[in-house]
Amino acid sequence: MRLDKFLADMNIGTRSEIKKMIRKGLVTVNNEVIKDSGVSVTSNDEISFNGELISYQEYEYIMLNKPAGVISASEDKRQETVIDLLDERHRKDLFPVGRLDKDTVGLLLITNDGQLAHDLLSPAKHVDKLYRAKVTGALDESDVKSFAQGIKIDDEFTSLPARLKIISSGDISEAEVTIREGKFHQIKRMFSALGHEVTWLKRVSMGPLTLDESLKEGEYRVLTTSEITALKGKR
Ligand code: URA
């Protein structure tokens, strides 16, 4: 690929900024200053920018413990996005796999691997997503049954059977919910149809990927090789 594309993919700057930097002599290929942005390079070449070696990464996989108050999008003119939280990243083409609501916290996978994202989100692949929720009002066996049967949300949508596990029941109840779909506000709408309002929602896992509880809200880390292999095994 072209030298300027290599550096742009690795998020060094925009294509035009990079062209200027190359012209200034800030980029070396195999220890030789190269001033031609269009020179062809491969991942076997040693490419440095400002004296720092830049290794090419085709795919990047990041686990974020999403905090409340940021939106699950790649970019937005007005609001902070989950991608804005990533100070250390290589690829410029990262996106979140699926959306969590602005006030939902917890596991969010961020990658540039479109095929993996498609497979994880495809309803046909039946990838379970586990959430923890706090809701208003007491929960009981009738709620568990309703979740298991599928809940009629409105004229157009009845949820697939889902699992509700009650952790505590009271004025505010706590539960675990496992769903296979990912419709807009799905869990909030399922509870709402049964007369409960969700006051807090956290995603804990998605298929074989479980939130690393050592990550505080807003923190992230790259996936381990075994986590990536397990996710790809879901294909
Ligand atoms: N269901 C919701 O209602 N909100 C989320 O963010 C995720 C699932």
Image: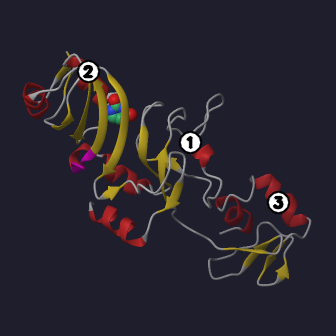
Which residue is denoted by mark 1 in the rendering? 74
> For this rendering, which residue is in front, 97 or 4?
97
Helix, strand, or loop for circle 2? loop
Q: Main secondary structure of the magenta part?
A: loop
Q: Looking at the rendering, in which quadrant would you find the N terminus?
A: bottom right
Q: Where is residue 8 in the image (x, y as percent from the top left)?
A: 70, 59
Q: Which of the colour schemes (rainbow, by chain, secondary structure, one colour) is used?
A: secondary structure
Counting from the top left corner in percent of width and height, residue 11 is at 68, 58
In the image, what residue occupies the spot 71% across and 64% down? 7
Spatial separation of the CA atoms under disc 3 and disc 2: 61 Å
Task: Identify the residue at the far right of this view.
Answer: 24
Task: Please state the extent of the stretch shown in magenta in the rendering.
Answer: 125-129
Residue 199 visible from this viewpoint: yes
The residue tagged 2 is 171
Task: For ligand 1, give the image quadrant.
Answer: top left
Q: Mark 3 points at which residue?
A: 19
Residue sitting at 32 percent across and 46 percent down? 121
Tell me if the residue at label 3 has its CB under 8 Å from ligand 1: no
Q: Of the residues under marks 3 and 2, which one precedes in the sequence?
A: 3
Q: Is 206 displayed left or right of 154 in the figure?
A: right
Quadrant of res 31: bottom right
Disc 1 marks which amino acid? Ser
Corner quadrant of residue 35: bottom right
Indicate the position of residue 106 as horizontal and vertical percent values. 42, 44
Residue 98 placement, left or right of 3: left
